[in-house]
Structures are given as structure tokens and as C-alpha cells.
């Protein structure tokens, strides 16, 4: 009878078939601002797994955007690539030049998938599209906004519901908001704009407001030395050196949110990705507004996109598409925006009942989205890292008084021309 039992067992196993292999979907994820981002992403991963048996999602938190890019590319070279990564939207040209990513159009081939590629805000797609193909799906995206302390405005005799609408008003209001102790030391600045971490990004806003973009759409020319761009850097420098409403020199990106919530500055320029963290920690009423205008309003978009690496199996590509479609669905996009302050990347997310109700009670949540009307793509070119560093160094040199804005930007433009000439 033993042979019969063995025969029956073999027959049953054959009927069931081999166990379905689990698809491992690992992705790098950068943490660029404060707030409970890892907890939110981990929660999404677990929820997706429950709804999609057979796919295991494993986020790898890789520091800031530069750290994430370095780790992802190093893993590729070592043959240990993750199929997917959230990287800078501005990494597009570098990733294409290194031939390490695949266009989502090549994977999203079903009619409903092709339609999905068109649901995102056009302003957010500009940094993810190259020669008509979509390489980056917007996820952790932002614009720069103005935060202001309504309590400080009221104390200074300003209308707490009226932020500065233009550069002149910002300098004038900031002067009234500066607070000093008996010894003449500043205890509260009028305004702070961060100049470490991502100085080029902040400067893009100044340049855009003064009527200029810093690069062309082909990624092979920069516009650093235009007179209006130079004037924009001069204004930024003057806020500290001439008007004395901002610390002279550099302002730290990483500590500015805390400085604002602790009342050390009455206004700050910062990413909308800090909105929820400010909401949760500020002990005073605060407002959020579009950035002030010079010749026009303006802000660059910012943040990260989902990229799909070429060294992936068909199963990994299928799993990656399923996950990215799921995590960018209207309900998740709405939830993500409420949990973090980043913008929901598609218009229909703002029509979900929960985000409509949230925005009705907290209108600050839609300012960054409304600013898309005046947005420009974040600085991205071929040789992005080197071209961007030229601008960062020029900004630092001007703000610290080592060079005039004109000399710093003209030198940066000359070097950028050398780097980009082969791509024209």
C-alpha cells in the first residue's frame, strides 16, 4: 500500500503544480525633508502586498536624492540592481546618457496603461519626458512656497492675512518683522531663503520671477549670465547684505523649518514637502502663499520621479508597473499629499472627497498646486551634476561676498558652455 500512497501524493502534487514564485520589487527611496515619510511608504508597501499576492515590495531608504542616485547606480554596476527607484526628476539626462533606464511607454502598452501616462499634471511631466517618451512618473513632487507667521505679522503691525505679493513688498515687510533684543542682536529675522542643500533650486525661483529660465528644454544650454538672472541674484544678496532682513551669507536648508517653527524667522521660502511637518509643529497660526513676483510669479517644480531600470526581468517590469500605477492612483495621491505636504500629482486626486474636505479646512494644502500655472521645470541638463554645481558655487560666492553676482554667474556660464557644447 505504500506505493499506492506515494502514487496518490505524487498525483496531488502534480495537480497543484509548482509553487508560484514571489516577485521581489526593491526600490530606492530618498528622504529629503522632515516628517514621517518612511512610515507612510512602509504602510503603502504592506497595503500593496496585501492587495497583490505574489509581489514583495521592499523600500531601501538611501539618504537624500544624491545619495539615492549614487547607491542606485553603484548597485547597477555591481550587478545588484533594484528594478525601481525614486530619484531626482532632474536626473533624467544623466540616467538616459548612462543608458540605465527604460521608458515607461515601452512597458505601459495596454490602452488603459497608455491613458494612465497622461493623467499627471503637465508641469510635473516636463522633467520626466525626453523626445516624446515618458521616463519619469511624478510622485514626490513639490514647488517652493512662502510660509509666514501670522502672529509675527500682527505684532509688527502688518495684516496677518496678507503676505507679500512682490519683491518690494517682501523686503519692506521683512524690515518691519526683524526683531532685536536690548543689545541689538537679532532674535527674529524678517525672511530666510535657504542657500545650502539646493541653492540652485531656490535661485531658479528668483530667476523665473525676474522673467528668465536657467536652461533650455533640450538640456544643452544654460542662461546663467543673462542680465535679469544677474539682477535676481543681486536681489537675493541684497536681502542680507543691504536690507539686513536675512542673515548675511548662507542659510541652512536642513534647519530652516525648525527656525521658522521656533519663531526665529517670520517668513521662509521652502518646499511644500515640509507643509505637514510645519502644520504639526508650529505653535502659531501660519499662512502659505505663492512666492512673490518681480516681473511675474514663478517657482520651479521639484522632487522625485519613479524610474524603471533596464536590467529588469519581464516579471519585475510587470510588478513595477502595477505598483507605480497603484501608488499614484487618485486615492493614494490624495492621502500622500495630506500626509506629507507634497502635491498630489494628478488633478483627479483633488476631487476625492477626503482631499476636498482637507483643503476646505486647510487651504494651505493647495497653494503649491495652484502655483503650477507659473511653474518651470527644475534645472536639468546633460552633465547635470557638474553644470548644477557651477551654479551652486556661483550662488554661494555671491551670497558670501566673495564675488559679485555678475562675476560669479558669468564665470559659471563660461564653464557650463564648455561642458554642454558637445551636446548641441
Image (cartoon, rainbow, N blue to C red):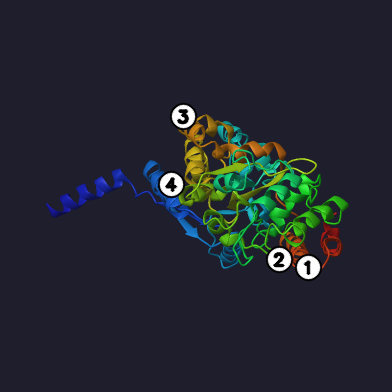
Label 2 neighbour load within 10 Å: few <14, some 14-19, many 20+: some
- Camera-nearest residue between 353 and 92: 353
Query: What is the x, y in percent for residue 102?
Result: 63, 50
> Which residue has dot 3 on it?
353
Q: Is residue 43 left or right of residue 349?
A: left
Which numbered dot is residue 42? Answer: none
Specify the quadrant of the image occupied by residue 187.
Answer: bottom right
Which numbered dot is residue 249? Answer: 2
Q: Foreground mark, 4 or 1?
A: 1
> Which residue has dot 1 on it?
401
First in residue order: circle 1 vs circle 2: 2
Q: Foreground mark, 2 or 3?
A: 2
Q: Secondary structure at mark 1?
A: loop
Query: What is the x, y in percent for residue 212?
Result: 81, 47
> Which residue has dot 4 on it?
44
Question: Could you tell me how far apart the alpha carbons at marks 4 and 1 are, in whole angstroms?
Answer: 47 Å
- Asked if marks 1 and 2 touch (Cβ < 8 Å), the reply is yes
Residue most toward the bottom? 402
Q: Secondary structure at mark 2?
A: loop
Query: What is the x, y in percent for residue 188?
Result: 60, 58
| Quadrant that contains the C terminus | bottom right
Amino acid at each position: 500500500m505504500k506505493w499506492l500512497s506515494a502514487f496518490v501524493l505524487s498525483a496531488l502534487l502534480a495537480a497543484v503544480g509548482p509553487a508560484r514564485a514571489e516577485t521581489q520589487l526593491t526600490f530606492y527611496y530618498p528622504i529629503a525633508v522632515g516628517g514621517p515619510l518612511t512610515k507612510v511608504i512602509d504602510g503603502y508597501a504592506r497595503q500593496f502586498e496585501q492587495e497583490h499576492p505574489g509581489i514583495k515590495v521592499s523600500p531601501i531608504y538611501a539618504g537624500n536624492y544624491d545619495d539615492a542616485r549614487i547607491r542606485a547606480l553603484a548597485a547597477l554596476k555591481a550587478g545588484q540592481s533594484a528594478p525601481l527607484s525614486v530619484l531626482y526628476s532632474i536626473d533624467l539626462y544623466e540616467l538616459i546618457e548612462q543608458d540605465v533606464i527604460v521608458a515607461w511607454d515601452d512597458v505601459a502598452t495596454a490602452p488603459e496603461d497608455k491613458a494612465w501616462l497622461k493623467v499627471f499634471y503637465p508641469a510635473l511631466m516636463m522633467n520626466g519626458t525626453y523626445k516624446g517618451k515618458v521616463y519619469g512618473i511624478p510622485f514626490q513632487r513639490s514647488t517652493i512656497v512662502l510660509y509666514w507667521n501670522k502672529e509675527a505679522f500682527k505684532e509688527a503691525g502688518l495684516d496677518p492675512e496678507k503676505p507679500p505679493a512682490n519683491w518690494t513688498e517682501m523686503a519692506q515687510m521683512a524690515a518691519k518683522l526683524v526683531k532685536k533684543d536690548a543689545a541689538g542682536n537679532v532674535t527674529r529675522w524678517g525672511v530666510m531663503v535657504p542657500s545650502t542643500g539646493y541653492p540652485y533650486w531656490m535661485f531658479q525661483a528668483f530667476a523665473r520671477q525676474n522673467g528668465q529660465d536657467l536652461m533650455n528644454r533640450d538640456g544643452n544650454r544654460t542662461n546663467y549670465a543673462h542680465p535679469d538672472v544677474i539682477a535676481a541674484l543681486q536681489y537675493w544678496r541684497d536681502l542680507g547684505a543691504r536690507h539686513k532682513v536675512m542673515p548675511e551669507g548662507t542659510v541652512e536648508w536642513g534647519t530652516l523649518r525648525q527656525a521658522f517653527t521656533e519663531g526665529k524667522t517670520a517668513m521662509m521660502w521652502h518646499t511644500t514637502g515640509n507643509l505637514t511637518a510645519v502644520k504639526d509643529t508650529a505653535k502659531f497660526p501660519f499662512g502659505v502663499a505663492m512666492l512673490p513676483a518681480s516681473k511675474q510669479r514663478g517657482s520651479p517644480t521639484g522632487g522625485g520621479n519613479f524610474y524603471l531600470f533596464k536590467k529588469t526581468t519581464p516579471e519585475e517590469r510587470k510588478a513595477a508597473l502595477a505598483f507605480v500605477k497603484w501608488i499614484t492612483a487618485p486615492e493614494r495621491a490624495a492621502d500622500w499629499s495630506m500626509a506629507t505636504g507634497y502635491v498630489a500629482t494628478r488633478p483627479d486626486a483633488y476631487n476625492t472627497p477626503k482631499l476636498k474636505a482637507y483643503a476646505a479646512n486647510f487651504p494651505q494644502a493647495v497653494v503649491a498646486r495652484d502655483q503650477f500655472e507659473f511653474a518651470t521645470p527644475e534645472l536639468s541638463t546633460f552633465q547635470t551634476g557638474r553644470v548644477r554645481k557651477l551654479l551652486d558655487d556661483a550662488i554661494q560666492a555671491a551670497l558670501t561676498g566673495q564675488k559679485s553676482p555678475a562675476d560669479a554667474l558669468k564665470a559659471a556660464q563660461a564653464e557650463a558652455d564648455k561642458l554642454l557644447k558637445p551636446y548641441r
